[in-house]
Image (cartoon, rainbow, N blue to C red):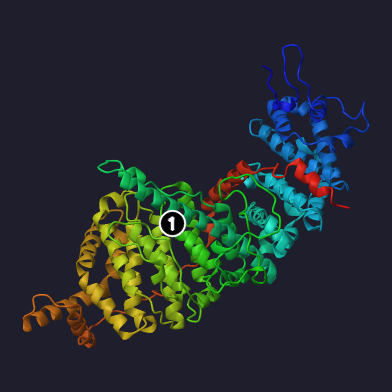
Amino acid sequence: MAQTEKKGGLLRKSSASKKPLKEKVVLMYDEIFTTEDPSKCNPRFWEELFLMKVNLEYLEGKLEALDGEELMKIKDNINCLFQHCIQALGEEHPIRVVNALQTLCALIRGVHQKNKSTSGFDIINMLVGFDKAELCMKNLMESLDSLLCAEGSESLKSLCLKLLLCLVTVTDNISQNTILEYVMINSIFEAILQILSSPLSRREHGYDAVVLLALLVNYRKYESVNPYIVKLSIVDDEATLNGMGLVIAQALSEYNRQYKDKEEEHQTGFFSALTNMVGSMFIADADEKISVQTNEAILLALYEAVHLNRNFITVLAQSHPEMGLMTTPTSPIPMTPVTPLGTTPPSSDVISSAELPLDADVQTSNLLITFLKYSSIVMQDTKDEHRLHSGKLCLIILTCIAEDQYANAFLHDDNMNFRVNLHRMPMRHRKKAADKNLPCRPLVCAVLDLMVEFIVTHMMKEFPMDLYVRCIQIVHKLLCYQKKCRVRLHYTWRELWSALINLLKFLMSNETVLLAKHNIFTLALMVVNLFNMFITYGDTFLPTPSSYDELYYEIIRMHQNFDNLYSMVLRLSTNAGQWKEPASKVTHALVNIRAIINHFNPKIESYAAVNHISQLSEDQVLEVVRSNYDTLTLKLQDGLDQYERYSEQHKEAAFFKELVRSISINVRKNLAFNTLSQELLLKEFSTIS
């Protein structure tokens, strides 16, 4: 029986006697792939070509099938096709423009495929020709800019952004993509901003625009002056910055919603599995990890905005109703194929307070809360490489926030209280916190909760040393602000102290294994110095005198851990090994903690003996502490409230290069140029006068 074939542009039912016919556009492509000028016999060749529906698969496949030498033979025709595509972008007929955009995508991708294996092959020469490159690329960028800024079709804008994303991501390492030099010279920055500041454009194209901007900012950022970095750092238009914030918040919120749905589905499945497995030995299988693909691209956009633009900090605190509860807008949205999150825009966008259906029962949120919830999910499991990258980037963003004066002002503002429901890792020894019991507190409490949660849940064999260091640095920067501005935060500091002491305990218990991979004394010193911050300056930022008493109680109660740490660092600092210097720094840092333990412990033992009590209660210990402060002598330690500010170029360049490479590959893999079918386009353009 005959089968219908469509692959490679074959249209007709095949049979034993007849060869299948090729569609006209495929025949025209075949002419381009000869050494002859296709317009020689048909002067209207190029005009007709752009009226034909593009066959992306055939065109890319044809380019892929050629080797470098064969491609060079038809270079003139490829140049000609590229130039006619650019000319067609200026046509009034929208179908021509759409076909030209799709053809450019196929050309750029197809020719770049060849570039991988052929040495001495120049992509710009192959596509445009050196002599015409500057003018052609200028015309291309100007046409794309005009289409993006015009009042016209949203479908065209969508394809323009897809073409630009294609252009940026054809190489894994975007800094090796020489075509981007023309995108730097002929900037489309203002067009991207216009999309983000307009509610309609933002809803349709905000996601692609934000990802495109994040990638362009990372082009040769350490080697030359990147105009997109310069321009992004000085944007001060409120509507534009809010627009960018809303696109990022919506994408992160969509991830949080998907995770929550999966979690609920997982729990339902798990409990039904439990009831059906009476006596079964396979319950552990039901407790598999809940996985939703992380979104590094949108996280990178948030990082660049926070890191480069001081004005964006205000956007973090802009209130809006909780986005997970939003309804989809009623305006028509182009259909996109279902692909993993992080590759296509979310289905809806929250635009501005004027466009939001306000509901008294909806919990008020903001970008920072959405980001903290997102961080609490991705930081749970750092074994997977993407999640490790995401977790690291979340902590870098929080580092930038913790260093910013304005950000600290709203984080610590007592008049800005929120309930932040962070995701907590399921652990055997603790109950799941009920969401309804969450108190309303300043946002800094949620940041500290997130740090405590990370400290408590990642003491494992594959120890994420780098993430722990960042975590402790964030806490330290927040404490420095509180000390400097005398902010008395009502926070359960005991949870932090307990987590830090348990971390020290873990480092000591796993000394041999950890020292084979990490300098654990760096981390131990940071933890000890956090305690020194509380001891030295606690009276300026702890909420009450009794909080200060509790700090001393906690140090005395857990004194064995500090004693063990001192023994360990003393042992290593007296040896002539590689750890001598870092260990001795910890020895010196422990001086005040040891003074507290050595001062109060004999007093507590004496009190117990005099009063014939075998075990003192907390109140009794606190009573001894309060009555013996005046005889305690502590040493003044310098530099506890100083820290080195975050620097990307010197310390994080390798991480960002790798991250951007990963994002580039992911965006390229998931680009869909046929997001709009020909039927939809015809329907849309039939209404254009």
On the picture, is 606 further left or further right than 574? left
Query: Label 1 belongs to which residue?
Result: 379
Q: Quadrant of residue 682?
A: top right
In this rendering, does residue 195 appear at all? yes
Amino acid residing under circle 1: Met
Q: Quadrant of residue 319?
A: bottom right
Q: Residue at x 41, y 70 (%)?
A: 436
Q: Secondary structure at mark 1?
A: loop
The image position of residue 42, as x and y in percent, is 92, 28
On the picture, is 457 further left or further right than 313? left
The image position of residue 257, as x and y in percent, is 51, 57
Task: In this rendered view, identify the residue nearer to me: 71 or 24.
Answer: 24
**Label 1 CA crowd tier, 10 Å (few <14, some 14–19, many 20+):** many
Q: Residue at x 43, y 61 (%)?
A: 470
Task: In this rendered view, identify the residue nearer to me: 654 or 28.
Answer: 28
On the picture, is 399 further left or further right than 453? right
Image label count: 1
Task: In this rendered view, identify the residue nearer to me: 492 or 675.
Answer: 675
Looking at the image, is 15 positioned above or below residue 662? Answer: above
In this rendering, does residue 236 appear at all? no
Q: Residue at x 66, y 30 (%)?
A: 118
